[in-house]
Image (cartoon, grey):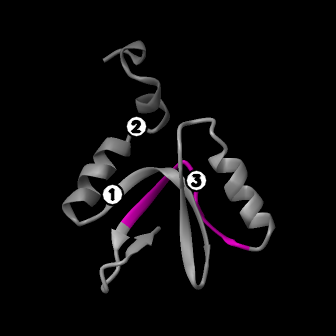
Amino acid sequence: APDDALHDYEQAAPLRDLLDAWFGWHGGHVLHGAAVGTAHGAVLLAGRGGSGKSTASLSALAAGMDFLGDDYVLVTAAPDGSPQVH
């Protein structure tokens, strides 16, 4: 298909749908969001594009938190059933 036939998000992240399907078969989900945390846990920041997820996650990084991802993150279940962000 010509490039103009693709949605903007498909052009920006051409493997997103494929990765979401593959991880879905293995119990994970690719989500549009950012994630930050510490050794004690993480926070998933979700929202529409332009809502401040990147700014908030970079501010958390500057404050000493771990930066887990921005734009797309993978969420799976830990062995105890709690959510895990990658």
Amino acid bearing label 1: His
Give the alpha-carbon distance from disc 1 to disc 2, as whole Å. Answer: 16 Å
Q: Report the side of 71 relative to 56 (left or right).
A: left
Residue 59: % across, % down? 77, 59
In the rendered structure, which disc, 1 or 2, sits on the residue that comes first in sequence? 2
Q: Residues within 10 Å of mark 3 (few under 14, many from 20)?
A: some
Q: Which residues are magenta?
A: 65-75
Residue 25: % across, % down? 19, 60
Residue located at (22% from left, 66% from top): 26
Give the alpha-carbon distance from disc 1 to disc 3, as whole Å. Answer: 15 Å
Of the 4 image quadrants, the one containing the N terminus is top left
Q: Residues within 10 Å of mark 2 (few under 14, many from 20)?
A: few
For mark 2, what is the residue? 14
In the depicted structure, whether residue 48 falls above or below residue 53: above
Residue at far right of view? 62
Give the alpha-carbon distance from disc 3 to disc 2, as whole Å. Answer: 16 Å
Residue located at (63% from left, 35% from top): 50
In the rendered structure, which disc, 1 or 3, sits on the residue that comes first in sequence? 1
Amino acid bearing label 2: Pro
Dot 3 falls on a residue whose secondary structure is loop
For mark 1, what is the residue? 29
Amino acid bearing label 3: Asp
Residue located at (49% from left, 34% from top): 12
Dot 2 falls on a residue whose secondary structure is loop
Question: Quarter-wise, where is residue 10 in the image?
Answer: top left
Residues at badges 1 and 3 in contact (C-beta under 8 Å)? no
For mark 3, what is the residue? 70
